[in-house]
Amino acid sequence: MTTDTPSQEPPGTPAAGAGTAAPGAESAAAPGPEAGPVPRRRTRPEKKVEITDPKAIRALAHAARLEVISELYSTQSSRTATELAQQTGLTPSAMSYHLRALQKWGIVVPAEASADARERRWKAAGTDFAINSGGAVAGPDFAVIDIELDAFRRRASAYARARDEQRQRGESAEPLPAVLLASNLLYLTAEQRGELTERVFELLRTYELEDPGSIPPGAERIATMWSMIPDDRPLPEP
């Protein structure tokens, strides 16, 4: 999922969203699992779902709804309200309400039911999802960014706790690091910003599973985040 602010960045450049953190000078790393086979990019037609209506964007400012969008668009698999409720900590009835709200804005759609299905399944309405507020100052997309940052903090804290528990048990650390956060300062033109964003997302796509139901041995579910935003500090004097 991407959040676009065209007035500040070139077209297609996200201010924040689901991507990968760019490695840089400042980083915090921790042990991670050994890399498994590189999954191939799924062969499927691309369909981008872009939300521009401020009302729809405000409706997304809910942690459970963003979790649903991330799950369905990232996996490209169908889920029931009960399955999604278990993942988000809601009741199935509350999740059904959120799914209907997302359906109203064309973000999710009912999936084809299996022969023995007793509950409606839902899937993403496309392959990629983006929020575009038109660059409005303090637009509703900033509330979405806050929720995404909260999710990052939750994952980072959970990973740190799990790592500490592993050390307390005397278990050895994995050989390869899992980068929690990396940052860098670059001087980029508008054209370079667009090029960098395109290259980052193209690289991410090469790691999308061709078959979401066939996960490579040793693979671990990893959440990524890519952000590019102008620095608010003044340039140093020459």
Image: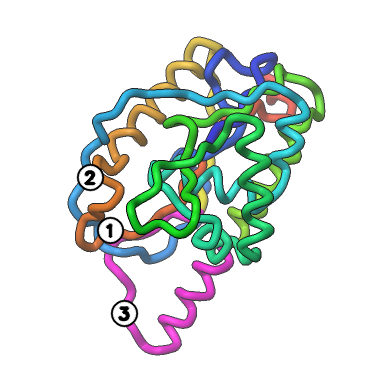
- Left or right for 234, reference 131: right
Quick one: label 1 or label 3, which is nearer the N terminus? 3
Comparing 202 with 49, the one in front is 49
Give the Cα distance between marks 1 and 3: 19 Å
Question: Does the CB distance between marks 2 and 1 fall below 8 Å?
Answer: yes
Residue 86, by quadrant, is: bottom right
| Residue 184 visible in the displayed image | no
On residue 172, the disc is 3
Secondary structure, mark 2, is: loop
Q: Is residue 121 among the parts visible in the rendering?
A: yes
In the picture, measured across the screen, residue 144 lies left or right of residue 204, that is: right
Q: Disc 2 marks which amino acid?
A: Pro
Name the N-terminal-most of marks 2 and 1.
2
Mark 3: give few (<14), some (14-19) or many (20+) Cα within 10 Å. Answer: few
**Of the pair 152 and 131, the residue shown nearer to us:** 131
In this figure, which residue is indicated by the disc labeled 1?
Answer: 219
Q: Residue furthest right?
A: 138
Give the vertical position of 95 relative to 30 (above or below): above
In the shown orientation, is residue 142 left or right of residue 204? right
Magenta stretch, residue numbers? 155-180
User: Is residue 201 depicted above or below 136 in this figure?
Assistant: below
